[in-house]
Amino acid sequence: GGLVENEKDEVLFIFRNGKWDLPKGGIEKNETIEETAMREVEEETGCGNLKIKQPLEKTFHVFKRNGEYRLKITHWFLMKSSYNGDLKGQIEEGIEKVVWVDKKDIPLLLKNSYKNIELLFNDSIYCKTALEKEKGIEKEYFLDALKTALTTAYKRNFDEIRPVEVEIKPEKY
């Protein structure tokens, strides 16, 4: 997914399913996650001239497809764009609006958004300290999403699931 800023330091938002969101989507065969993020931003918004500046946090959410619950991991990137043409929401994805938002107005939009998007802005724009990140916010959020998916899928309570410390080898992002 992309958190896109323009030359006026505004942020690109989409409105779909009654909520403010950021453009994102699924990877296609032989595509890198960076290529996916840029392609999806352009397809969903019409915004071009994209350049990735840096990777951001990953987010997690549960969705249902074909009667089965799945956990989706989204890799986010901070992007810059010099595009100043018309923005157009991808109708097939249910995108009703695409707008550039002044950063001072973002907290208002986040009141009608998803928790994942709010978490992303807390980490990237409002810059939580390294100490706060070390408290395991991402790990706790992932664990909550996993519990929700399992509880919904198997119709039993999975509150007894607890995190286990493991060594994770870093990936590219």
Image (cartoon, rainbow, N blue to C red):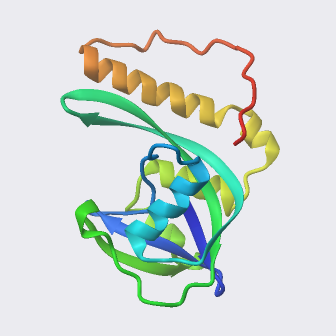
Residue visible at 32% across and 19% down in the picture: 151
Q: Is residue 80 visible?
A: yes
Residue extending farthest bottom: 85
Residue 112 in the figure: left or right of residue 37: left
Residue extending farthest right: 130
Disc count in the image? 0
Residue visible at 50% across and 55% down in the picture: 117
Residue extending farthest front: 30
Residue visible at 41% across and 82% down in the picture: 87
Instruction: Identify whether 107 is placed above or below 156.
Output: below
Q: Is residue 22 visible?
A: no
Instruction: Identify whether 29 is placed above or below 49.
Output: above
Residue 69 position, x and y percent, is: 29, 28
Instruction: Identify whether 33 is placed above or below 167.
Output: below
Is 106 in front, or is 14? 14
Residue 45 position, x and y percent, is: 41, 73
Is 85 in front, or is 30? 30
Residue 141 in the figure: left or right of residue 122: left
Residue 70 position, x and y percent, is: 35, 30
**Which quarter of the rendering shows the C terminus?**
top right
Instruction: Identify whether 171 is placed above or below 89.
Output: above
Residue 7 position, x and y percent, is: 66, 85
